[in-house]
Image (cartoon, coloured by chain):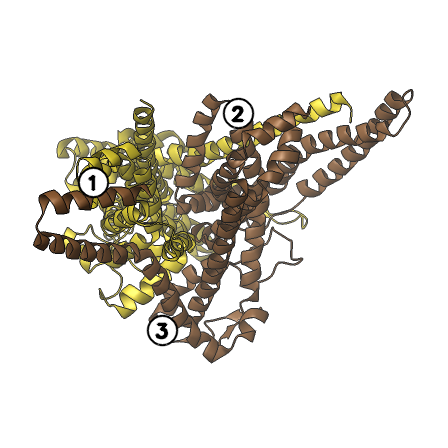
Amino acid sequence: MELKTRRMLDRSFTTIGVFAIVLMAVSLVILLQPIVWRGAGAFIFRETVENRKLNLELLGRGSRAKVEIEITETEAARKPVYDMMAAFEAEMEEGGSAFRKQYGREYSELRDMLSELLGPLPGEKNPVLIRAQYGRTRWDRAQVKFHQIRYVEKYDYSDPDRMGVKIEKPRSALFESTSIEPLFGYLEENIEQMMLPKLTFYWRFLFDRSFDAHFFGGIWPEVLGTFYLALGAMLFAVPLGIVTAIYLAEYAGESRFVSLLRTCISSLAGVPSIVFGLFGLAFFINTMKISNGKSVLAGSLTLAFLVLPTVIRASEEAILAVPRTYKEAAMSLGAGKWHTIISVILPAALTGILTSIIISLGRAAGETAPIIFTAAVSVGRPLAIWQTLSQPSPALSWNIYNLATEHEAVDEIRHVQYGMVLTLVAMVLLLNLTAIIIRARISKKLRG
Amino acid sequence: MNDRIYEHTESDLRSRLLMSRGTRRHRRLGALAGDTVLIVIASSSLIALLFIFYFIIKDAIPFFQIEGVREFFTSTRWYPSREDAEFGALSILVGSTLVTTGAVVVAVPMGVLAALCLSDILPFSMRQVVKPVIEMLAAIPSVVYGFFALVVFAPLLQEKGGSLLSVGALIVLVPVSIIGVGVASDLIGARFSEGSRGVARIASAAVLSIAVILVLYQLNRFLGGLRIVSGTNALNASIILGIMALPTVVSVSEDALNAVGRELREGSYALGATRAETLLRVVIPAAKSGILAAVILGVMRAVGETMVVWMASGNAARIPQPIFNYLEPIRTLTATIAGDMGEADHVTGSARYHVLFAMAFCLLVFAFVSNFVSEMILRRSRKQLG
């Protein structure tokens, strides 16, 4: 090949390599961007008057006087809507069966949607479910509902080679020249007065329990459950892991047994997480019967097995990083082996071990598969610490899956899902960041 | 050796100066007990592994006793909840294989290139920036990747799938084909005599680039016209899994590349090779076993991953038609275990419960074997490199 081509190849190789790195960074950004942006929407959003009503009646938050003023204000703005509806209902009564046939279905659909937007209509019985007792509490959801009220969605399948095309038609056309037609124009102009959206910072999202299958409220039971599970796992894994690491680093030589042990540790690290879950179910729950069905304890034990290899490896590294001179100095002063380990090596390796614990904690907090069969439920109250021995708990990781796939109204509670994802990611990344900072400090110290 | 000398002098000193016989015996007994306890605790991971194997096998055996081995591995009829249940897991095994292959196709080229960049190309200061990016990718929980795949990526794929695919293909293929045309025309030019070389190069480059442009145009049209019925499919799961497996591939192969000595690189440079030639012809061949181990570990990560495939792959237990059609939903072993245990758990002892353990057994054996192989490879390469 000519020199020019070789140089070009060299340069393009470098470019492609850098491109791979950039692609990796970009995928991280693409992944995190919607999580951060929409996750923040769970905490900072525009609430409607319905949310303030809910806060007052359900949780006793906010000032009653202010909310009542707002309620009278919005009721005044809503009154024409209710009046128009009443007028139309009267028109239907009079219009006879042909009229009813033409408008009956459309009207009841409209009525349902208005009730979802504004809360129970006058004259309706108080519904059982909390979600039906209030209108849309979030302005973004209210706008979506409002859009549905204004437009009828239809799909056009006339072209068989393409997917159905969405077409939106104004709903007012359905009610042309009836007494309810002006309703749409009125809504258009007065929707803000009817809902009074206001920016709010709902920091209690982290500390509230959830209401009505996560429609309202926060994620405290999940956060707490994740804490219990992860901390419980570390409670079992850390002592075992550190002792094993001490053995491997300080006692073991190069015997057959030690190499078997090392193979076991790396195999354990390679076992798929879902297999840990099945093992936890078969061993801790079905065989040992440590609890009657799922429990946080069983989940923690399962997770402990999962993070054990990580703890061992990182702790061993930390112990091996302690300069040999420390050990030699201690021994030359007459300290025994144990004494040296306890009073010299472990303190010197402590920060490194701490890093390993922090990283494993993050890993345990994020794992889902091992806790599906052993610890996680989809809805639950926050547990007291002694209840973790016998009761299951919701956890962030499991509930993200559960709410995103199995919930009855997945789209309605998107913000809760994103809020959970953001909380989990923030937790895990903060833990890792701490570990990175500690590690940077250690390496600085070791460099002198 | 050193240790023994210390211990020797230590005990000598003690016996001469410090302790009576009784204390010595106590000490020795204490040390013996301590060592035993230490070894027992240190074996906890060995015990854990044995327990896992025992309990998975114990619950997997009844399935093979009831239903036999053949149906499980050869039939594609998966109807576990019917009255006359059928447990043909072939389509599920194929699904796992497909997704893993896809993930490897995404992760390995990108991962190895990134590792090369980290070990040889980027300056030290940039490395300090890139490393945390990789660590963050590794730290993000799998359910978050799954959530992204389901909520963000799947709708995108469904709505703009065709154009997304064609843009992606162009991003990868355009640089590759430019380099390919450059190299090919150079090689063709070299066959001609000195005088006509330049003309031959230009002519062949022109012909080749027209051909490549035509091919790319057709491919682009084909991909752009594709209709993706469901955003949750094998492609989605493969891409996300590939990104998840990236950190493993990068860090293990970077270790392998760093283990290749400076002397080899410098020797190659001294012979006049460019950096790309050094990397491709010297460093990668020397590190190939380590890179192979990285690939195996990446495969393990992809096979054993649950949440992403459960959320992103569509969970349809059938073999895509044709088999490389990544746009169809598929189902994997891990997702089947996760999804079916909820219902099967109530009927402990039924074939439906035990079949999931049989699947877990397959996963376990696969993980164990590939881990063993990668260990062997790494150990041998370490010995070779000295």
Q: CA distance from mark 3 to mark 2?
A: 57 Å
Image quadrant where one finds the C terminus of chain A: top left
Label 2: chain?
Answer: B
Image quarter of the N terminus of chain A: top right
The chain in yellow: A
Q: Which residue is mark 1?
A: A340
Q: At label 1, which amino acid type do we have?
A: Thr
**Marks 3/1: CA distance?**
55 Å
- Tell me if B41 is positioned left or right of B176 in this view: left
For numbered disc 1, what is the local secondary structure? helix
Q: Which chain is brown?
A: B
Task: Pinpoint residue B149: horizontal percent, then vertical percent.
Answer: 48, 45
Q: Is residue A435 above or below residue A402?
A: above
* Residue under label 3: B347
- To the question of a shared chain for discs 3 and 1, the answer is no
Q: Nearer the viewer, residue A210 or A357?
A: A357
- Which one is in front, A247 or B326? A247
Instruction: Check disc 2 and report the residue beneath it.
Output: B122
Callouts 3 and 2 in the same chain: yes
